Image: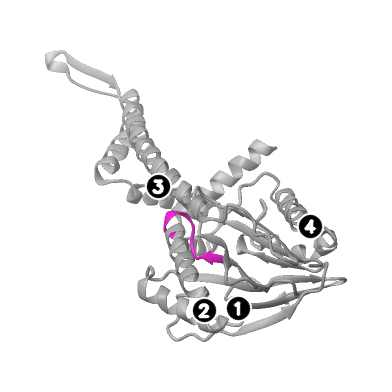
Amino acid sequence: ARLQRTYAQEIKDLYYFYLDEKTRARLNKMGRFQRAFVLLAWLFKSLLTKLSPGRRVALLVACIFTVLGKTGFGIDALGFNLNHDLRPWGFIVLLIVLMLELKDKLVAKDEIQIARQVQVMLFPRSHPTLPGWSVWSISRPANDVGGDLIDYVELDGFRHAVVLGDVAGKGLGASLLSAQLQATLRALAVHAPSLDDLAARVNETMLRDGISNRFATLFYAELQHDSGSVRYVNAGHNPALAIRGSRVDRLGASSLPLGMLEGAEYEEAALHLDPGETLLIYSDGVTEAEDIESREFGIERLEALAPQLRNVDPETAGHRVLAEIDTFLDGLRPADDLSMVIVRRHDA
């Protein structure tokens, strides 16, 4: 059953990789049998367009040889006849194309592994020890490198910032923009007069120096040592959850993501956590994790876990959330980066 689910996930990945959203919408409007034939044709066409011209021709030749199979010709008057089976040649050409594509993938994978090592070095190597607070975090990229950002910034002897950002997209491009976002935040956070001003400056920097049509969501929380005071700004990010006793409060977004609109305004907010209360910050990879039937994990399931997250340390709470997501996925690979920061207030 697990192998079957793995194959189902691989086929689903192919479907979403080779067909864009517009094409998938057109397919959904077709009848069952028409959709099957058109799907194969469009997949093959998309495959060809992703190959280099030389390999495209080689693949077409391999297909022609395979279809023709055994062929022959001759001139009876001269007693000349030639019969030849082209299928082995088609297989050889196809194998060569596959080897070339695999070579390119392995070379790129080595480079991505180096990028992954750099990204890991940029992530915090340990969780901060703060008076009155316990902090834990985790990030699981969907690919070898991801676009989620987790960071801790020491502002002064009395304040610490915890950051969770999510750059649109996945892979190497998202990871590069994530590194830029991290560097910008670290450079501006200490001297920013307010969190709304900080978010506005980061937004301007991303619009000026970032990648076109790429944006990032951000939840930035500033913890006051030895107290339960929390100031935060939510720039288009998923609502963080403040788990208090018998209730759960959503800390929703009050503004647009960073890098989306010039002159966007951001709003600082505040809350107070009593000892034993928890703040759960997460990326959309948590709530948008999909099972084999394309059902999302959802924020409701996450909120339903709140009773299990009370009265435990952040690391235990985090592993309980991860276990619930893994059970929901039932062996499927997450389609998006999955990150969490969990902050728990305790007596100073």
Residue at horizontal 29 percent and vertical 43 percent from the top = 56
Q: How many other residues sit within 10 Å of disc 2, few (<14), some (14-19) or many (≥20)?
A: many
Residue at horizontal 76 percent and vertical 63 percent from the top = 301
Mark identifier at residue 42: none
Please say if the residues under marks 4 and 3 sit with CB atoms less than 8 Å apart: no
Marks 4 and 2, how far apart in space?
Answer: 30 Å
| Comes first in the chain, label 1 or label 2 | 2
Please say if the residues under marks 1 and 2 sit with CB atoms less than 8 Å apart: yes
Type of amino acid at the residue the image marks with label 4: Asp
Type of amino acid at the residue the image marks with label 2: Ala
- Report whether residue 215 is seen: no
**Where in the figure is residue 98, as x and y percent of width and height?**
37, 34
Q: Is mark 2 on a helix, strand or loop?
A: helix
In the image, farthest residue toward the front: 157
Is 289 inside the magenta-drawn segment? no
In the image, farthest residue toward the left: 78
**Where in the figure is residue 97, as x and y percent of width and height?**
33, 35
Marks 1 and 2, how far apart in space?
Answer: 8 Å
**Pointer 3 residue:** 44
| Comes first in the chain, label 4 or label 2 | 2
**Pointer 1 residue:** 233
| Comes first in the chain, label 1 or label 3 | 3
| Comes first in the chain, label 4 or label 3 | 3
Mark identifier at residue 313: 4
Is 167 inside the magenta-drawn segment? yes
Please say if the residues under marks 4 and 2 sit with CB atoms less than 8 Å apart: no
| Comes first in the chain, label 2 or label 3 | 3
